[in-house]
Amino acid sequence: MNMISLQDITIAFESQEVLKNVSVDVRSGEALVLVGPSGQGKTTLLKTMSGLITPRNGKIFIEQQEWLTLSSKQKLPLLKKMGILFQKNALFDSLTCLENIAFPLRETTTLSDWEIQKKAEYFLDAVGIPHARDLFPDEISGGMQKRLGIARALALDPQIIFYDDPTAGLDPITSKKIIELIIDLKKKKNSTVVAVTNDMNRAYQLADRIAMVVDKNLLITGTPEETKNHKDPRVHQFVRGSLDGPLTAP
């Protein structure tokens, strides 16, 4: 079953067309990773898939329901099935790590305070930072902030999780650990993942399939192995980090 389907999506901001006639299906339980040159629209596409951006035209299906035709009330059950980790983590500086996770639980569930605390503690433990319980975001490292963002994104047990560059600004060892954590949590929950990254090593580590956002379109490049051997010169240049090729042609 497809969890998300985009059909001929065009996205524009005022007169600036960002993506044109994009179509893609994301299957239940798979990890689709979006890669591509900076400024091509990867995050825009991710936010469109999650319902945060409305396209100029085209159709979006989430769990086979046509998203753009649903009322706010009809969208709510689907929104509760989604979690999102923003690139900057979007943590509340004035709340402790535990309170950051508890906040969405308090706002959107009927759990008791005791149940919320226990669930927040469980997710702090799941991402490996139980000792940060009473610390504030500015008192922990960038890698720990990323783990906290993941814990909060997962706290509502979403079936679909969107990660916007989850390893941005992290060193290679921490980056690898974060992706291992995402994969581990995905397996435990059998969730569907859509992620954006600029790091091909992390894309190969996480992805079932890879798609490249380039020239206002989406090119499905396939599995990590298929992507490494893709014949399109834009893909070939990007995955190898070559300075010469169509992506840098004058």
Image (tube, rainbow, N blue to C red):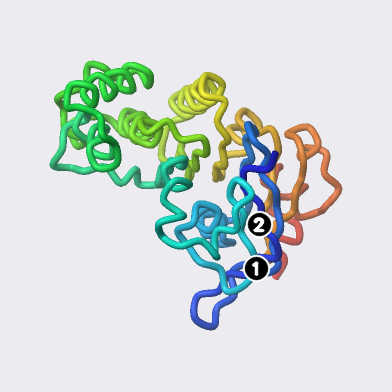
Amino acid type shown at disc 2? Leu
Q: Secondary structure at mark 1?
A: strand
- Which quadrant of the structure image shows residue 239? top right
In the image, 216 versus 248, the foreground residue is 216
Amino acid type shown at disc 1? Gly
| 87 left or right of 250 in image | left
With respect to residue 115, does 242 lie above or below? below
Q: Residues within 10 Å of mark 2 (few under 14, many from 20)?
A: many
The residue at 51%/24% (across/down) is 189
| 98 left or right of 174 in image | left
With respect to residue 178, does 52 lie above or below? below
| 173 left or right of 136 in image | right
Image quadrant for the C terminus? bottom right
Q: Which residue is mark 1?
A: 58
- Which quadrant of the structure image shows residue 92? top left
The residue at 61%/55% (across/down) is 37
In the image, 186 versus 241, the foreground residue is 186
In the image, 122 versus 133, the foreground residue is 122
Image coordinates of residue 218 in percent, x first then y, are 70, 57
Q: Which residue is mark 2?
A: 6
- Which quadrant of the structure image shows residue 83? top left
Q: Secondary structure at mark 2?
A: strand
